[in-house]
Image (cartoon, rainbow, N blue to C red):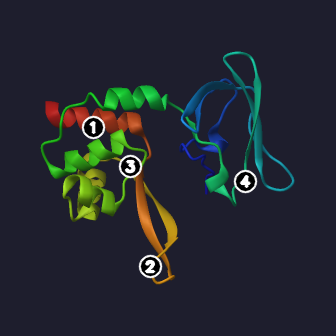
Amino acid sequence: MSTKTKGNVIVEQIKVGDVHFEVDLRTQIKVTVLTKPEQNETGNWIWNSETEKGKEVPYLVNPKYLSFSPELYDYNPKEFRKSASRIKKPTNQVQEVLHSLLTNDSITVKQMMNDTGILNLSARLSDLKLKHNVSVEIKEVKTENKHGREIYYGKWMLKDRLKAREVYDSMFNG
């Protein structure tokens, strides 16, 4: 099983020279990997990167606590969101779901019902996977309901935003 950062960078596949974008509290920095990630004696992944200004940034990812991992992307999220906001308006529910995935970090059933009126999100996600070969992953989120019981809901996110953008554009050209 691979270890991923919050931005879906697979730690085991990071190489020296890779460029990543780290987002923290609405601030973004561009870093270049200096050392290949290695697992230490406690199982944590550690490596170093460098900012454009030459400052070294140490990284640590604990596979047991991925929610505390850095929000590290292999693309520029700010530029991607700007370009995604300029894409054509969706004309059907499958395009609507893909558009929402492209313009947000993740989507939920509640969000899609409120924002788009789509009631059967799982069917539209299935269409994206089976008919358009768009890889979408689900993250299970634990919360508490109004009665104090532990419940779970799903957040869906794209595995490959650039490929998904190509698919979205092709829906209008083909």
| Residue 121, x across and y down, in percent | 26, 61
Report the front residue among 71 and 174.
71
| Residue that numbered label 4 is attached to | 62
Q: Residues within 10 Å of mark 4 (few under 14, many from 20)?
A: some
Residue at x 79% of width, y 55% of height: 43
The residue under the point 38% across, 49% down is 135
Q: CA distance from mark 4 to mark 1?
A: 34 Å
Look at 22% across and 47% down and name the residue there: 96
Badge 3 or badge 4: first in the primary sequence? 4
Amino acid on which disc 1 is placed: Val
Query: Which marked residue is nearer to the observer: mark 2 or mark 3?
Result: 2
The residue beneath circle 1 is 167
- Name which residue type carries label 2: Lys
The three-letter amino acid code for the residue at tag 3 is Ser
Residue named by callout 3: 135
Mark 2 or mark 1: whose residue is earlier in sequence: 2
Distance between the alpha carbons at the discs numbered 3 and 4:
25 Å
Contact (CB < 8 A) between labels 4 and 1?
no
- Label 1 secondary element: helix
For marks 4 and 1, the one nearer the N-term is 4
Indicate the quadrant containing the C terminus: top left, top right, bottom left or bottom right.
top left
For the residues carrying marks 3 and 4, which lies nearer the camera in this image? 4
Secondary structure of the residue carrying numbered label 3: loop
Q: Which residue is mark 2?
A: 146
